[in-house]
Image (cartoon, helix red, strand yellow):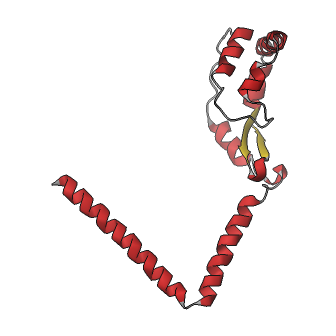
């Protein structure tokens, strides 16, 4: 019985959507002004989506800073991490079917780099971790990158003090 009621409900909801669409279409059919307004609205939406975002200076980071400032800071914990070249390669292999980063390097291209690159990268990470530089950078900025129109990438960084 529950399945029958659910099916009827879906059928009536579909009929309501269809009737609403038909009413909208009938209203537009003889009204050239509304037709032009609808076309203009769609064109404006498509044009707005293709525009690059505004400059970084136009982004107000203060709300994020206020929220993060109100949160309690965790107590320091002694963590000993050791980054290895093999560990970095394994992590990169896990990303073989992921999209490229903003620099257009995919995981397969990175994996073709010589072993010296991976050893050097591991050494850089280990040094940064031992000096707490990486932690300072992570805590110092909230960053996100998103893909824009035409394959362009845009970054947003807000200092988090």
**Residue reaching furthest to the left:** 1
Tell me where residue 125 appears, x and y as whole percent: 78, 15
- Residue at x 76%, y 34% (from the top left corner): 141
Q: Quadrant where the N terminus lies?
A: bottom left
**Residue reaching furthest to the bottom:** 30
**Up/down of 55 relative to 88, above or below:** below
Q: Quadrant where the C terminus lies?
A: top right
- Residue at x 34%, y 71% (from the top left corner): 15
Tell me where residue 78 appears, x and y as whole percent: 66, 10
Q: How many marks?
A: 0
Q: Quadrant of residue 72?
A: top right
- Residue at x 72%, y 40% (from the top left corner): 144
Tell me where residue 25 appears, x and y as whole percent: 49, 81
**Up/down of 135 relative to 49, above or below:** above
Q: Is residue 151 visible?
A: yes
- Foreground residue among 91 and 155: 91
**Up/down of 143 relative to 55, above or below:** above
Q: Quadrant of residue 157?
A: top right
- Residue at x 79%, y 13% (from the top left corner): 118
Q: Is residue 83 visible?
A: no
Q: Quadrant of residue 66?
A: top right
Tell me where residue 56 appears, x and y as whole percent: 82, 49
- Foreground residue among 120 and 74: 120
**Up/down of 103 relative to 111, above or below:** below
């Amino acid at each position: 019985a529950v399945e029958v009621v659910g099916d009827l409900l879906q059928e009536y909801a579909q009929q309501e959507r269809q009737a609403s669409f038909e009413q909208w279409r009938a209203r537009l059919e003889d009204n050239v002004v509304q037709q032009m307004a609808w076309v203009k609205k769609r064109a404006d939406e498509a044009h707005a989506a293709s525009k690059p975002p505004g400059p970084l200076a136009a982004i107000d980071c203060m709300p994020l800073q206020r929220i993060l400032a109100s949160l309690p800071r965790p107590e320091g914990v002694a963590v000993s991490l050791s980054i290895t070249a093999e560990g970095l390669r394994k992590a990169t292999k896990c990303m073989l079917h992921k999209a490229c980063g903003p620099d257009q390097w995919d995981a397969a291209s990175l994996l073709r780099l010589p072993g010296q690159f991976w050893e050097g990268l591991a050494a850089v990470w280990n040094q940064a971790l031992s000096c707490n530089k990486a932690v300072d950078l992570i805590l110092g900025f909230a960053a996100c990158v998103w893909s824009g129109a035409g394959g362009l990438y845009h970054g947003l960084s807000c200092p988090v003090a």
